[in-house]
Image: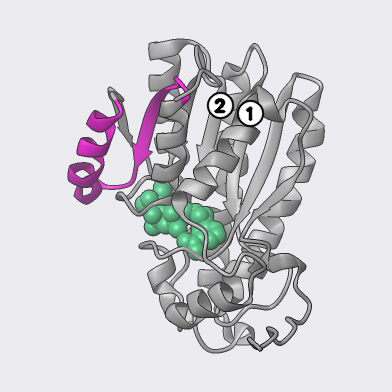
Amino acid sequence: SNTLMAGKRGLIMGLANDKSIAWGIARACAEAGAEMAFTYMGDQFRKRVAPLAEQLGVETLIDCDVSDADSIDAAFAEIEAKWGKLDFIVHAIGFSDKSELRGRYVDTSRNNFLMTMDISCYSFTAVVQRAEKLMTEGGSALTLTYYGAEQVMPHYNVMGVAKAALEASVKYMAEDLGKDGIRVNAISAGPIKTLAASGIGDFRYILKWNELNSPLRRNVTIDDVGKSALYLLSDLGSGVTGETLHVDAGYHVVGMKAVDAPDI
Ligand code: NAD
């Protein structure tokens, strides 16, 4: 354990279960001495998230649907009443109709396009908007993205388009809020087996491909992401904003992998 986040208070959004990337980040922050509140979506997740909160001594658990402005307002009102300020926020939320996370992007429907953009992109802007008012001593906001924003990945489709917009929004908000000492960044995580990922077609194949072709020759874990998140959320990242940090075992630098030299 360390004291990187001692005295810091943060809101973690997007915890579904102990496989969630949000859980890896929450654990790293807890180990570094942060005080946290969690949001989750819907009653059915409360029973999964409550024991996780208890494990880290987190008392505040808020049901929040980011597609609903009133729900976001209510969550921030609760944070304001409890703490009056906020130092960091983690947005680990994404959603698309899984019937469109396979097949061709060009077949995306208008309704799912708008819903995917709303939940996977706009909601980060919506929460940073509220968080800004509570980050009176500066702060750090972090979201999660994927390489499918930059390059075409199988089945990522409309989610890739939404993540590209999300990454652009990180840059715009970094400029808007930089003068108030608020940093805004994203982590582009390699594929990890989570609930959200299970909706993506051929996900096991994508995992295997990344394991075999990334420079580190392995997949990343939620602990890998948690440690890098700690860097961006804590004072270690004090000079970093508007950045998309790849935590992907190096996969994004590979153009074409060499044939591994055979043992002689
Ligand atoms: P997860 O299923 O554990 O988390 C996704 C979360 O989004 C869930 O907690 C879910 O409740 C929440 N959510 C969905 N719709 C919501 C809404 N309307 N309001 C509030 N919350 C809502 O999966 P995860 O993989 O940990 O996903 C976290 C983030 O990481 C997502 O943005 C995802 O796109 C991103 N990401 C995941 C991977 C991966 O391979 N797993 C890779 C790169 C980026």
The C terminus - image quarter = bottom right
x, y (%) of residue 214?
Answer: 64, 70
Q: Which residue is mark 1?
A: 140
Q: Can residue 70 be spotted in the picture?
A: no
x, y (%) of residue 150?
Answer: 73, 67
Q: Is residue 78 magenta?
A: no
Give the amino acid type for the residue marked by disc 2 in the picture. Phe
- Residue 42 to residue 96: above or below: above
Q: Kindly state the secondary structure of the residue where label 1 is placed.
A: strand
Q: Which residue is mark 2?
A: 88
Q: Kindly state the secondary structure of the residue where label 2 is placed.
A: strand
Left or right position of 37 against 185: left
Q: Is residue 39 magenta?
A: yes
The N terminus - image quarter = top left
x, y (%) of residue 26?
Answer: 42, 36
Give the amino acid type for the residue marked by disc 1 in the picture. Ser
- Residue drawn at x 53%, y 48% is 225
- Residue drawn at x 78%, y 77% is 255
Task: Classify mark 2 as within 8 Å of ligand 1 or not, answering yes or no.
Answer: no
Left or right position of 8 against 137: left
Q: Can residue 145 be spotted in the picture?
A: yes
Q: What range of the chain is rendered magenta?
A: 32-56
- Residue 107 to residue 217: above or below: below
- Residue drawn at x 20%, y 51% is 44
Other-residue count near label 1 (Cα within 10 Å), few / some / many at <14 / 14–19 / ≥20: many
x, y (%) of residue 75?
Answer: 40, 29
Q: Quadrant of ligand 1?
A: bottom left
- Residue 174 to residue 132: above or below: below
Give yes or no for contact between labels 2 and 1 (Cβ–Cβ under 8 Å): yes
